[in-house]
Amino acid sequence: MTPVLDVRGLRVRFRGAAAPAVKDLSFAVAPGEVLAIVGESGSGKSVTALSLMRLIDREGGRIEAGELWFDAPGANGAPGERVDLAALPEARLRRLRGEAMAMIFQEPMTSLNPVMTVGDQVIEAVQAHRPVAAKAARARALELLRTVRLSEPEARLDQHPHELSGGMRQRVMIAMAMAGRPRLLIADEPTTALDVTVQAEILALIEDLRAETGAAVIFITHDMGVVAQIADRVLVMRRGEPVETSETRRLFAQPAAAYTQDLIAAAPRLGSGAPAPQDRPQALLEVRDLVARFPLARGLFGGARREVRAVDRVGFRLDRSETLGLVGESGSGKSTIGRAVLRLVEPTSGSIRFDGREIARADAAAMAPLRRDMQMIFQDPYASLNPRLTVVRSITEPLAIHTDMSLSDRRDVAADLLRRVGLSADHLDRYPHQFSGGQRQRLCIARALSVRPRLIVADEPVSALDVSVQAQVMDLLLDLQAEHGIAMLFISHDMAVVEKMSHRIAVLDRGRIVESGPTTSVLADPGHEHTRRLIAAAPIPDPTLERPRLPVGREPASPIFDIGAPVPPQAFAERGAEHWVATA
């Protein structure tokens, strides 16, 4: 069978770099095949993807050598032809991008236009290569948003990217990539920002796409569970070079390279154990009846006021040296709770007590001295780092604000933090754009740790990291927690990661906690259907195991955001000393 893409001896170098970022890389992908490219952050996975689309020039790199033979479709129904993408003129490439080959990028917020509505951007992708009337293009855009299971798709068409959660934005990117039904789909970490249920549906969606159209898929990921679920073959990369290529089942059963063995061993697995419970719990954070509602913009002619109820009467307690894991689907209110606790989002009502002090209505002056004790690791590392600041200035910014430490001492602290999160002190004077997505997340973790806070709200802190660094950073956070008594509110969609990090778990659905209790108890004997669904959808790093296939292209049973409806009373049933489940 003739491959859709045949890469031969690819070498890519960035401007001013002594060594190439990718060298001597060769592989092929056949019609209907999924090839997963895995490796640590900085191994050259994304550089390879950008090179295939000939977008690497825009990132300061260039293809020094190699051939990229692509089975391009003919124009107006004419027979196709084999073309070398590395030598193709830009005008011809523009015709191929989107229609014959498409890419799902890793960071949706930086890939979507912030001043255009979601609908306009999807419509633009639909009309880019096909003469479709405006009405038909909007209908197709709505169909695509439904296909990727975006809640309330009609309303989302008229919203802007900043009004959507990270997982919702990624689904918009996937819809745009699918608009042209491409022959080659390059997916660069497409499920990193998605909760496990939507991730499972998107993986099934990609499988359906390749089955229906015969599209070849290059799937770049650090999640070995996802690799086991979707890939036919796996290419392992390290430091820009291929390590080994193998059929997926053979790779997991008999990895030839020691590096591959380490990647598989580092993959988190459900059932690997949770931290031991606290002997003498001491409350640091107490949240009661927390409500966060956001008004929706009115239409041109006014109308009744509508609200998004993002958090609905949530309550929990977090002790010193304890981690509470918040899990739930995208849009369930996890990030809003974390931001409200730190007063980065104003709660509508409720009580937030930090170390015995009520802060829910504290003004800026009252909050200022508490900011050092309360730090956050944000979900989107690129958006939370100032592109104009060097690494040393970014990491030590909290120290500059909250201490009188000298610049020299701050630089020493930054160098030590970089080493602890798996980077080098040589990176201190670089800028955020010079790092991969996973490396930027490590910078954000280092910044949050710089002032040794008492509370860290970690919003998907390891979702962008490869499995080996993920394990390293989780161990680092656990060590620092034990050493300094840090309390953590740990927000994640990865159930295995939550299990390893959390003493207790609270499961959220549409802004409400539906189940809560000790981690081991909740995961071993989940009492709520939503918890069972999350556990069932968690990827397993074993390609021999059967897994439930979640339905694709359907509307959720109820909207993620409940707009304007009355709040029903909730009754809770006791389930042991601490484990409880919502029954209504």
Image (cartoon, rainbow, N blue to C red):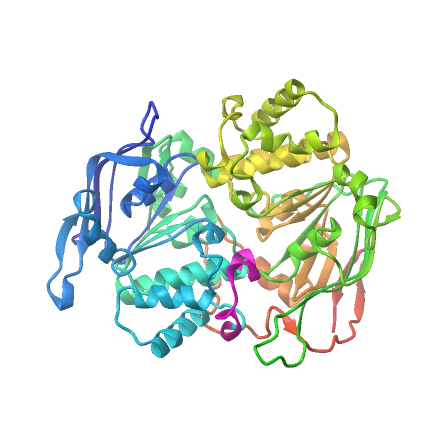
Query: Would residue 35 appear left or right of 500 to someone viewing this image?
Result: left
Seen as rendered, the residue at the extreme front is: 301
- Pick the quarter of the image with the N terminus: bottom left
What residue is at 41 percent from the left and 74 percent from the top?
A: 143
Seen as rendered, the residue at the extreme top is: 408
Q: Quadrant of residue 368?
A: top right
What residue is at 65 percent from the left and 67 percent from the top?
A: 510
Q: Quadrant of residue 152?
A: bottom right
Q: Nearer the viewer, residue 167 or 496?
A: 167
Q: Nearer the viewer, residue 330 or 339?
A: 339
Image coords of residue 43 (percent x, y): 39, 34
Residue 156 counted in the magenta span: yes
What count of labels does the image hold? 0
Residue 545 visible: yes
Query: Would residue 240 appear left or right of 411 to someone viewing this image?
Result: left
Residue 314 counted in the magenta span: no
Q: Is residue 13 above or below residue 579?
A: above
Residue 4 visible: no
- Pick the quarter of the image with the C terminus: bottom right
Image coords of residue 283 (percent x, y): 85, 45
What residue is at 43 percent from the left and 70 percent from the top?
A: 147
Image coords of residue 2 (percent x, y): 16, 53
Q: Is residue 408 above or below residue 260?
A: above
Q: Which residues are magenta?
A: 153-167
Main structural element of the magenta stretch: helix, strand or loop? helix
Q: Nearer the viewer, residue 557 or 72?
A: 72
Seen as rendered, the residue at the extreme right is: 356
